[in-house]
Amino acid sequence: MATDPRQAVIAILTEMTGAPASSMTDDTRLAEDLALKSVSRMEVSVRLQDVLGVKLTVFEILKARTVGDLVTLASRQPATSG
């Protein structure tokens, strides 16, 4: 899977929703356009952590409204252990 945040988000959403990557823009709405429910958003969060090392809080993942919001969150520096 891609390690570029935008590519990772789109790859995960494409796999989970079946929506074509070419149809996803920063303005694509998670709930309305992709029918992504809260449980599915938690799975997105786990997958982003696995792929990019970015840990998102429940609040952050549920607050995200668009693909662009997820890309912004996924673009943060990976969590470091210590």
Image: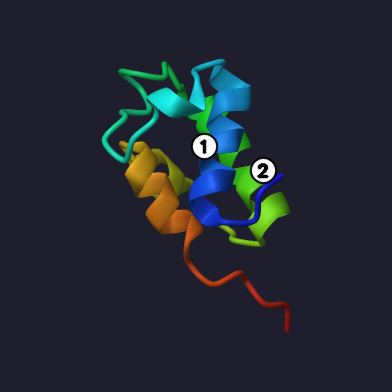
Confirm whether residue 16 shows in the render: yes
Residue situated in front as seen by the camera: 1 or 22:
22
Q: Nearer the viewer, residue 49 or 38?
A: 49
Mark 2, other Cα within 10 Å: few <14 / some 14–19 / many ≥20: some
* Residue at the spot 49% in from the left edge and 28% down from the top edge: 21
Label 2 secondary element: helix
- The quadrant of the rendering that contains the N terminus is top right
x then y, percent, for residue 32 = 30, 18
* Mark 1 neighbour class, 10 Å CA radius: few under 14, some 14 to 19, many 20 or more: many
Which amino acid type is marked by label 2?
Arg
| SS state under label 1 | helix
Task: Identify whether 59 is placed above or below 18.
Answer: below
Q: Which mark is residue 10?
A: 1
Q: Give the CA distance from mark 1 to mark 2.
A: 12 Å
Task: Residue 34: give its label.
Answer: none
Quadrant of image for the C terminus: bottom right
Q: Nearer the viewer, mark 1 or mark 2?
A: 1
